[in-house]
Image: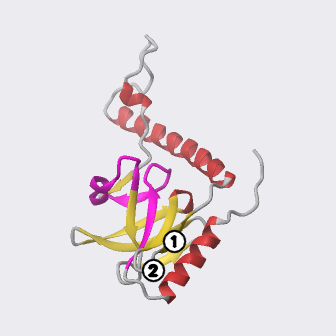
Amino acid sequence: MATYTKPLRPYLFNCYYQWMVDNNPTKIFIQVNAGIPLVRIPKECSGFTQTDGTVVFNISPTAVKNFEVGEDSIFFKARFSGIVRELEIPFAAILSIYSQQLKFGTDFPHEQYYEEWIDNHTEIEEADSSISDETADVEAGESSEEPDDGESTSANKRKCNLKILE
């Protein structure tokens, strides 16, 4: 596994976001790849996922509360269908930031760091999912092993990284 310098995206995100906030737009949008591991969005958003697997969020200060920028993710609370939900969006999933009123924004550049980050977190989520599946099977009194015929159903082959919060 290669070692990379710190990723640029969190720094660019902070610069663009702060500049937009300082210029008082009513809407600051981010485009998020909902298929990236550890993206945690409310189930109310699943209907708004575009055909390319992305979701757009308004993250302006008037639209969200408790906005926080972490080392690997942004965190905030927002209302969906009248219910306050907590969101966590890793920088690996943030594709762009844009202000409609300012007519300004950017698509974030591709970074090798995030390819590796996604690969590592996909493996972790698949392992966690496997452990959860085995636990559920054992609790139900079923075997967690694959059928002896070597065939698995298409449901076993597909993994969904989108986390729907209840």
Left or right: residue 1 compared with residue 116:
right
| Disc 2 residue type (three-letter) | Leu
C-alpha separation, residue under disc 2 versus residue under disc 1: 8 Å
- Nearest the viewer among 55 and 36 is 55
Q: Residue at x 45, y 23 (%)?
A: 145
Residue at the extreme top: 149
SS class, disc 2:
loop
On-image quarter of the C terminus:
bottom left
Q: Nearer the viewer, residue 117 or 21?
A: 21
Q: Which residues are magenta?
A: 27-54
Q: Amino acid at mark 1?
A: Gly
* 131 part of magenta stretch: no
Residue at (59% x, 64% y) in the render: 72
> Which mark is on residue 105?
1
Quarter of the rendering containing residue 32? bottom left
**Structural crowding at the residue carrying mark 2, measured as other residues with C-alpha within 10 Å and reported as few (<14), some (14–19) or many (≥20):** some
Quadrant into which the N terminus falls: top right
Q: Position of residue 51 (x, y in %)?
A: 36, 47
Query: Label 2 belongs to which residue?
Result: 102
- Please state the horizontal and vertical placement of residue 96, each as a whole percent of the image: 51, 64
Q: Position of residue 97 (x, y in %)?
A: 49, 69
| On screen, residue 127 above or below 118 | above
Asked if the residues shown at circle 2 and circle 1 are in contact, with their CB atoms under 8 angstroms apart, the answer is yes
Is 20 on the left or on the right of 27, as rendered? right
Residue visible at 52% across and 59% down?
Answer: 95
Number of numbered markers: 2
